[in-house]
Structure formats: C-alpha cells, structure tokens
Amino acid sequence: IKLSAVAYHNTLPFLYGLERSVLASQLSISLDIPSGSARKLREGEVTLGLVPVGVLHRVPEARIVSDWCIGSDGPVRTVCLFAEKPIEELKRIWLDYHSVTSVRLLGLLLKEFWKLSPELLEAGPGFREQIGGETGGLVIGDRAIGLEKRFPFVYDLGQVWKEWTGLPFVFAVWVSTKVLRPDFVQSFNDALSYGVHHLPEVAESRSEANSADFDLLDYFEHNISYALDDRKREGLSRFLTAIGHHPVNWASPEPRSVFPIQS
C-alpha cells in the first residue's frame, strides 16, 4: 500500500510506529510537503496520506481513517506569522506555499479575529529572506524553527486559534480514498499509537534534530497534540464550516485504537 507522510519533525512519531509495526513490509512510504501529500492522494498516486484539512474537499471520496492527527491545543510553534513590526502595521504578508490549511487559517484569523486586511502574497522558495519592514511572512514546518530569534513579533496560529475559539486545532489527518479492510485500519491505528506512546524513544532516535533553540521531545510533548479526540473534532468542524467546506467523512463512526488516547 502506497502511503504519503509529511516530511516534518511532527510526523516522526507516526513513522517510528509504522516502521516497527506488522504493516512495515506492506507499506511503501514517501515523504512530502503537506500540499504534495494531498496532491498524490488526489491524483491516485497513493492510497493513504497525511493530508492538510484545508484541502479535504479537493480529495474525491476522502475518508478520515485514523484517530490520530497533527494538531495543537495551544502554541504549535511551527505555524507562525513572523514580522519586524506589530501585525497592525503590516501592509503585506507572504504566504507559505507548503500548506493551504495554514494559509486558510491565517486568512480566517485576519478577518475574524484581528479585523485586518493586509495584502496577501503567494510565496515561493526563499521568501523568508523577504520578510522585513511592513512585510510579514507565514512560515510553517521545520523551517519555522529558530525564526523566533530573528523577528521581534511572532504570532503562533495554534495559540491565536485557541484564544479565539477555546478549541484545539487540527492541521492534518490521515485520509484514504478507498475503503480499507477493518483489520488494516486497526493495525494502522495501533502503529501510529505506538509511536505517540514512545515519544522519548522517537526523540532519542533523531537526536540530530536538537539544537540550542529546539528540543525535539519538548516539541512533541508540549506543542503537537496527536489525539483526534472529541474536542479536536469539534475544532475541525468549526474550522471547515468557517471556511465554507463540507463536513468530513469519517471512515467509521468512532475509530479507536487499542492504546488509550492521550493528547
């Protein structure tokens, strides 16, 4: 089974569990940016993908097949607006091209929370070097790590969403375009759960990711929230409704893995 995962640090626990599961020999895993994972699933290149929720409506017959996700219940640290000036003084904002979801989230917060309307610019490679003066930049993923040292104004979108709604935010979910066997879904959930429940081992296995400004285990435990629980489902529904998208299609009414769910 071909599977596309996201090539960011926040996905490492999932990969750790999958590589050690009974499914390991049955999976062909590619690592992509979020928009690439969605494209591969939409075009039939893979059967399963970790897909940004903002593009679920573009994936035909999208079914959420897991009770694990990439989410946050407060600061997420790797989805931030960086600027040299306060957001009220920004005239332009570069939009990271890696994920539509974060772009849609920023647009929603600008309109409904901050009540601001700066010019939004489509970014390309190297756009981070163009952040300055009255131009801010939305940066997501591992490339955001350390930028808080460069810019005096940092707006964490996970934190701002929580302040506005009181709910956690879901950035990406595991999606299939096909009906999967129940035993496969169960094993898949168990594999993801195994990784989430062994975060210290995951962090130790990728110790090279640590730096003076970044602690991988702390990031796993305090910024990324992996359980797709009821509160995250509520947050997901609220976001999709706010941006005018249809409700999600769950693969089963209440998917659960054998491990207890913990955020």
Image (cartoon, rainbow, N blue to C red):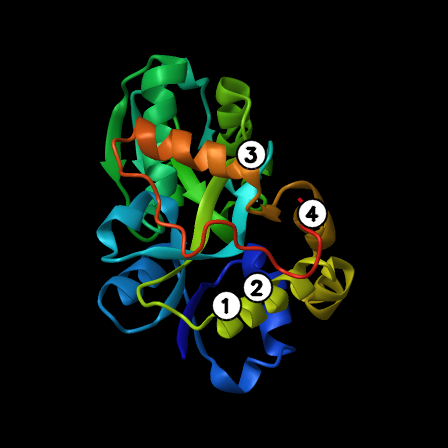
Above or below residue 145? Residue 203 is below
Q: Position of residue 36 (x, y in %)?
A: 32, 61
In this view, 133 is above or below 260: above
Q: Residues within 10 Å of mark 3 (few under 14, many from 20)?
A: some
Residue 123 sits in quarter: top left
Q: Quadrant of residue 193?
A: bottom right
Give the CA separation, mark 3 to mark 4.
12 Å
| Other-residue count near label 2 (Cα within 10 Å), few / some / many at <14 / 14–19 / ≥20 | many
Q: Secondary structure at mark 4?
A: loop
Residue at left offset 48%, top offset 63%: 7
Question: On the rendered structure, is 237 left or right of 111?
Answer: right
Tell me the number on the disc at residue 262: 4
Q: Amino acid at mark 4?
A: Gln
Q: Earlier in the sequence, mark 1 or mark 3?
A: 1
Could you tell me how far apart the alpha carbons at marks 3 and 2 are, in whole angstroms?
19 Å
Q: Is residue 49 visible?
A: yes
Contact between marks 3 and 2 (CB within 8 A): the answer is no
- Quadrant where the C terminus is found in the figure: top right
Contact (Cβ within 8 Å) of mark 1 with mark 3: no
Q: Residues within 10 Å of mark 4 (few under 14, many from 20)?
A: few
Question: Hey, what amino acid is under mark 1?
Answer: Val
Residue 191, above or below 121: below
* Disc 2/disc 4 C-alpha distance (Å): 13 Å
Q: Which residue is mark 3?
A: 231
Distance CA(mark 2)–CA(mark 1):
6 Å
Question: Which part of the image, by quadrant, shows the N terminus?
Answer: bottom left
Tag 3: amino acid: Arg
Kindly identify which residue carries mark 2: 189
